[in-house]
Structure formats: C-alpha cells, structure tokens
Image: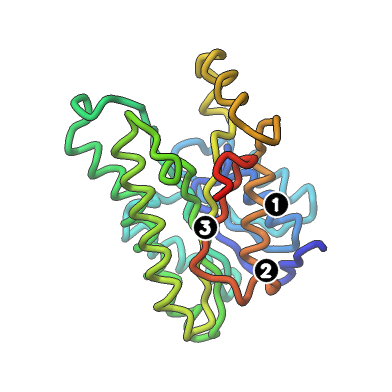
C-alpha cells in the first residue's frame, strides 16, 4: 500500500541534506506539499528543492533556526500564508553530537542538546497547534534515535536529550489525542549520510556487523516510516516509537 499524502502540507526541519532530505523527498513522492527548512547550507537546500520540483512536488524553502522560537513562529506563519495550512510537522534539525566521556562534556553542550531535541519540538508544536486544533487533525513525527534504546556509552548528553524527546512526545500524544492530532517518533539507527563521510571505516564495519538484516539503512527507510505515521492509515496510532535500524532493537 502506498500511503497517500495528497493535499497535505509537511514541514521538515533540517531538510537540506541527510535524513531530513530523505524524509522530505519521501513525503513529496507520497503527494505532500513539502516545506524544506535549512539554516546554513543554502546550496544543498536549493538543490533539494529543485529535485523535488523536478518530480512535480510543490516545494517551499524557508531559512530559519529551528531552535529559535521567534524564527520558528515566522516560518510557520510564512508556510500557512502560502499553503493555508500545515498538516505534518517533522522536527529533524540537529547539531553535531560528538561522543565523549562524561568528564569531557560541559554544561553548555548538555543545554544545546536539550534545546535542539526538547525545546525545538516544543517551539514548533506551539506554533503549529492552533491550526491543527482548529482543523481537528494533525501529525507530529519527531526524529529521535536508537541511542536511547541502546543506552550508548560516551554519548550521555545526546542520549539524555533523545530520551527527553521521546518522553515529551508520549506526553503530547496523550494531550493532543482529543483534538485528532497524533504524535509519534521514528528512531533511526546509524544511517550514513554526508555528515558521516569522515567516520572511521572500522567503526562503520563494526556497526554493520550488528545489524540483523545485514545492510545499511537509508534516509528513504526513515522517510517511509514517517510517511506511514503521517498518513490517514495511521490515524489510530499515537504515542509510539518505531525503531528503523534493521532489527538492532527487536524488543
């Protein structure tokens, strides 16, 4: 079954490249009008927009810092002014996440992780909820990570923030259910994208050996999970986390 998102409007933050780009492309192929968001890499953002338009997808590009509440409000206002609604929200923007022993992190880095993975979804939801509540329909799909489920060591700031993001999503799912709004999370494993091009080959090889399905995941795999949660077929599914990692977390 191909989940149709025809006439839906989807905003994917951090979607100029990587997983966000894959999600945006998949939602566009499913029929959604796609809002691409970027902060620094305009060249990649423009390239993604042109590729979507080449596939007859109605695509809009907005530059905004997804951790800044004022810029988020302005972005959502611009989207609603152009398309009239915003039906699907995918908080995906992310900063670098270096792995370090806890002694090498500082409090500012912990705060940055919290700002991106808890406060940013909060700001985004706060901006889109008036319209979703009015229409009594909406989809919020947070991109989290398997690191919370796997308790990855030397990653404490990121793991804690992702745990907070999942907890926030579960609470919002209960709170927003009476309005016909679902909130779910997609938790990818390690899916190599542009940001991983300089990662050590031995680290990649070691991780690949732990994937029961025996292959790397792709951004499109993540996009397919988001498309499902975005669809009418998932209207009775909320508060759930779907790990997209080839079977590394089968529980």
Residue farthest to the front, as pictured = 251
Where residue 37 appears, as percent x and y from the top left, is: 51, 50
Res 249 → quadrant: top right
The residue labelled by disc 2 is: 231
The residue labelled by disc 1 is: 26
Res 232 → quadrant: bottom right
* Residue 202, placed above or below residue 20: above
- Give the residue drawn at x 49%, y 84%: 179
**Which tag, 3 or 2, sits closer to the chain's start?**
2
Q: Nearer the viewer, residue 88 or 172?
A: 172
- Give the residue drawn at x 70%, y 52%: 26
- Give the residue drawn at x 74%, y 69%: 6
97 on left or right of 80: left
Helix, strand or loop at disc 3?
strand
Distance, label 1 to label 2, CA atoms, is 12 Å
Q: Mark 1 against mark 3, which lies toward the viewer?
A: 3
**Which tag, 1 or 2, sits closer to the chain's start?**
1
Where residue 86 appears, as percent x and y from the top left, is: 55, 70
Helix, strand or loop at disc 2?
loop
* Residue 116, placed above or below residue 122: above
Near mark 2 (Cα within 10 A), the count class, few <14, some 14-19 or many ≥20, is many
Q: Are marks 3 and 2 in contact (CB under 8 Å)?
A: no
Identify the coloring: rainbow
* Residue 208, placed above or below residue 142: above
Distance, label 1 to label 3, CA atoms, is 19 Å
Helix, strand or loop at disc 1?
helix
* Residue 199, placed above or below residue 176: above
Where residue 236 appears, as percent x and y from the top left, is: 61, 76
Q: Quadrant of the N terminus?
A: bottom right
Distance, label 3 to label 2, CA atoms, is 16 Å
**Which tag, 1 or 3, sits closer to the chain's start?**
1
The residue labelled by disc 3 is: 241
């Amino acid at each position: 079954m191909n989940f149709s998102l025809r006439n839906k409007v989807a905003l994917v933050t951090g979607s100029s490249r990587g997983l966000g780009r894959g999600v945006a492309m998949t939602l566009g192929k499913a029929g959604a009008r796609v809002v691409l968001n970027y902060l620094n890499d305009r060249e990649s953002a423009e390239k993604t927009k042109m590729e979507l338009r080449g596939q007859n997808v109605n695509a809009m590009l907005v530059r905004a810092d997804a951790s800044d509440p004022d810029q988020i409000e302005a972005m959502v206002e611009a989207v609603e002014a152009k398309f009239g609604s915003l039906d699907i929200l995918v908080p995906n923007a992310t900063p670098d996440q270096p792995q370090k022993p806890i002694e090498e992190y500082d409090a500012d880095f912990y705060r940055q992780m919290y700002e991106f993975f808890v406060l940013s979804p909060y700001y985004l939801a706060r901006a889109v909820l008036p319209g979703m509540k009015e229409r009594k329909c909406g989809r919020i799909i947070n991109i989290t990570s398997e690191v919370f489920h796997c308790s990855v060591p030397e990653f404490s700031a990121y793991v804690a923030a992702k745990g907070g993001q999942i907890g926030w999503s579960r609470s919002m799912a209960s709170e927003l259910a009476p309005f016909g709004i679902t909130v779910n999370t997609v938790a990818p494993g390690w899916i190599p994208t542009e940001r991983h091009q300089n990662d050590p080959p031995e680290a990649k090889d070691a991780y690949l050996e732990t994937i029961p399905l025996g292959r790397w995941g792709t951004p499109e795999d993540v996009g397919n999970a988001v498309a499902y949660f975005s669809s009418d077929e998932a209207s009775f599914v909320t508060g759930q986390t779907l790990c997209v990692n080839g079977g590394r977390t089968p529980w």
